[in-house]
Amino acid sequence: MRDADAANTLTDAIALDTVTVRYRGAVALDRVSLSVAPGEIRVLLGPSGSGKSTILRAIAGFVPLASGRILLAGRDVTALPPHARGLGMVVQNYALFPHLTVAANVGFGLSARRLPKREIAERVADCLGLVGMSAFIGRYPRELSGGQQQRVAIARALAIRPPVLLLDEPLSALDAPLRAGLLEELRSLHARLPELAIVYVTHDQSEAIALGHQIALMRDGRIAASGTLRGLYETPEHRYAAEFFGQANLLPIRIETALHDSAEVSFEGQRLTVMGASGHAIARPLLCVRPHALDIDATGSNRIAARIVGVQWMGAVQRVQAVAGAHLLRIDLPAGREAPAIGADVTVGFAPDRACLVADT
């Protein structure tokens, strides 16, 4: 995790230092610290009202801070207005000027900076080339599709050559095929601009999976968890993170023996081993095991007696539901494998290193 407690504010593209934002007395951000290195894509993920867009607006300078500070490349910009921060920003509704051509929209910020016309024309051509819109330079926004308009908005943000690009749910107004195509283009764009830091706000897990080098999961104005997607998926810290990143079986257990790298736990009277987490620091522990990590008729040490209550075909997998005591287990089996009959008594198992302990919070 690369948040401000481990950040080097002299080299980070962005650093938020215990930032608090209040709207009419209500706390929208609560002492948030976050850092983004040059060349990093940081995804801010969470439900509506969690604070992710407020972080973006605070970085851009559109909301005042109640406390804390914001640094860009080591420079304290907390008191600077948006236009003085030199950042590129793209929002979900494109925000193009309808009376201007594509070229004029992309060059608008450059004209405001009074750059020479020749340099403006060169930068406009370069940026439209980056987003694959060179052939539309003379058109107006009304003559473009939603995806094309968003590409123009990205080109306009890049034209000022910002060290940081802020993207606030830029694909939410587009349908699924267009979103997939633009996500691929954003990945390609970042590969061609390796020093560009990107902060991307979304509530969509698939976008986070496609883009995120690092992910900050938001809840109630705070960062609830931060790290790589794989780390957050495989070893979440708590129930909130475990449930946000895909479905998980979360089972109440009692810790019997805790070591530095493993724990012996009991569930429904059956002893189980979990590797990689001792459980010492977890006040209310739950066993977290993903549906694909469970198997039926397993022969390993971790075995749970259960009864099949449902089978659902889901394309690549079959979702099998089983009950163990009073608890429902979800198990994903390959689509080509024969599922047990409803009502069958089975043994469900998992490898000790394919589960973890999480806090019930």
Image (spheres, rainbow, N blue to C red):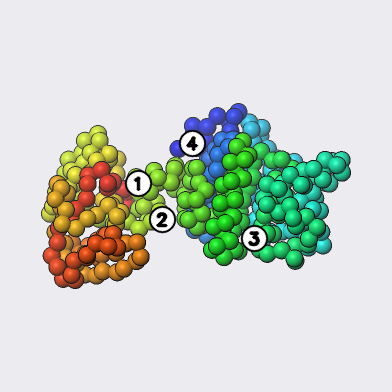
Relative to 305, 148 lies left or right: right
Q: Quadrant of residue 15?
A: top right
246 lies above or below 80: below
Q: Closer to the camera: disc 2 or disc 1?
A: 1
Give the residue drawn at x 17%, y 40%. 257
Q: Position of residue 199 (x, y in %)?
A: 58, 46
Q: Closer to the camera: disc 4 or disc 1?
A: 1
Q: Quadrant of residue 169?
A: bottom right
Q: Nearer the viewer, residue 101 or 258?
A: 101
Q: Position of residue 53 (x, y in %)?
A: 58, 53
Q: Earlier in the sequence, mark 3 or mark 4?
A: 4
Name the residue that disc number 1 marks. 234
Relative to 132, 46 lies left or right: left
Q: Nearer the viewer, residue 72 or 331?
A: 331
Question: SS for tag 4?
Answer: loop
Distance between the Cα atoms at labels 2 and 1? Answer: 12 Å
Q: Closer to the camera: disc 3 or disc 4?
A: 3
Name the residue that disc number 2 marks. 244
Give the residue drawn at x 53%, y 44%. 42
Question: SS for tag 2?
Answer: helix
Amino acid under disc 3:
Gly
Name the residue that disc number 4 marks. 2
Q: In this view of the protein, can residue 260 be seen by the observer? A: yes
Q: Earlier in the sequence, mark 4 or mark 2?
A: 4
For disc 1, the neighbor class at 10 Å (few under 14, some 14 to 19, many from 20) is some
Q: Closer to the camera: disc 3 or disc 1?
A: 3
253 lies above or below 262: below
Q: Position of residue 127 (x, y in %)?
A: 72, 46
Q: Earlier in the sequence, mark 3 or mark 1?
A: 3
For disc 3, the neighbor class at 10 Å (few under 14, some 14 to 19, many from 20) is some
Relative to 29, 304 lies left or right: left
Q: Are marks 3 and 4 in contact (CB under 8 Å)?
A: no
